[in-house]
Image: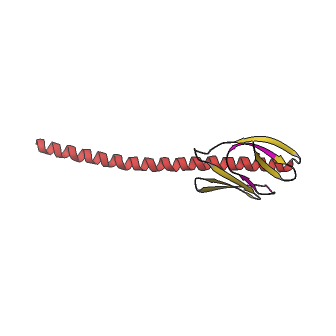
Amino acid sequence: MKGQVSVEFIAYLSFTLFVSAVLMGVLQDKQANYLQTEEEREAEELASRVSYIAEYALTKKNTSFNVRLPLQISSEDYSITVESGTTRILIGGEVVRSLNNYEGRVIQIKSGGRYEVVNNGSVYFQER
């Protein structure tokens, strides 16, 4: 009788460990997807913000103002390209795109920080 209890206990323990391992794998996969989605959401928000700034600057001839962009997105460096119709953010080998109404010269931003946005006939983002 004692031998059968030991076998049942080992079977129950094995089953519990198996279910726990499967559950942990599923949870880690969900967490990785959530973090990727969060990074993409932050990048899309930044792309929209930069697009709006470029569009706004385009309407204000002979003006300049300062903006601050985040240094990193989800602890990763990024670069931004604003061109007619599209804003692209390159982050961690992935490209996040956002549509815009900007019609002007291509703007390249290598990283976050403080920028002076200048419109002297063309829109420029100058690092400060």
Name the residue nearer the viewer: 37 or 16. 37
Q: Provide residue 58's location: percent of width, then percent of height.
A: 83, 51
Residue at 40% of width from left, 50% of height from top? 25
From which residue to which does the magenta span run?
A: 98-117
Residue 98: percent from left, percent from top? 69, 54
Q: Is residue 123 left or right of residue 2?
A: right
Which quarter of the image is occupied by the C terminus?
Answer: top right
The residue lying toward the viewer, choosing from 8 and 53, is: 53
Q: Residue at (76%, 57%) from the top-left corner?
A: 106
- Furthest residue toward front: 128
* Residue 113 relative to residue 35: left or right: right
x then y, percent, for residue 68: 72, 40
Q: Is 87 covered by the magenta stretch? A: no
Q: How many numbered marks are there?
A: 0
Q: Is 115 inside the magenta-drawn segment?
A: yes
Identified at 46% across, 50% down, the residue is: 29
Query: In the depicted view, which residue is nearer to us: 67 or 45?
Result: 67
State the image coordinates of residue 15 (x, y, percent, origin top left).
28, 48
What color scheme is it? secondary structure
Image quarter where the N terminus lies is: top left
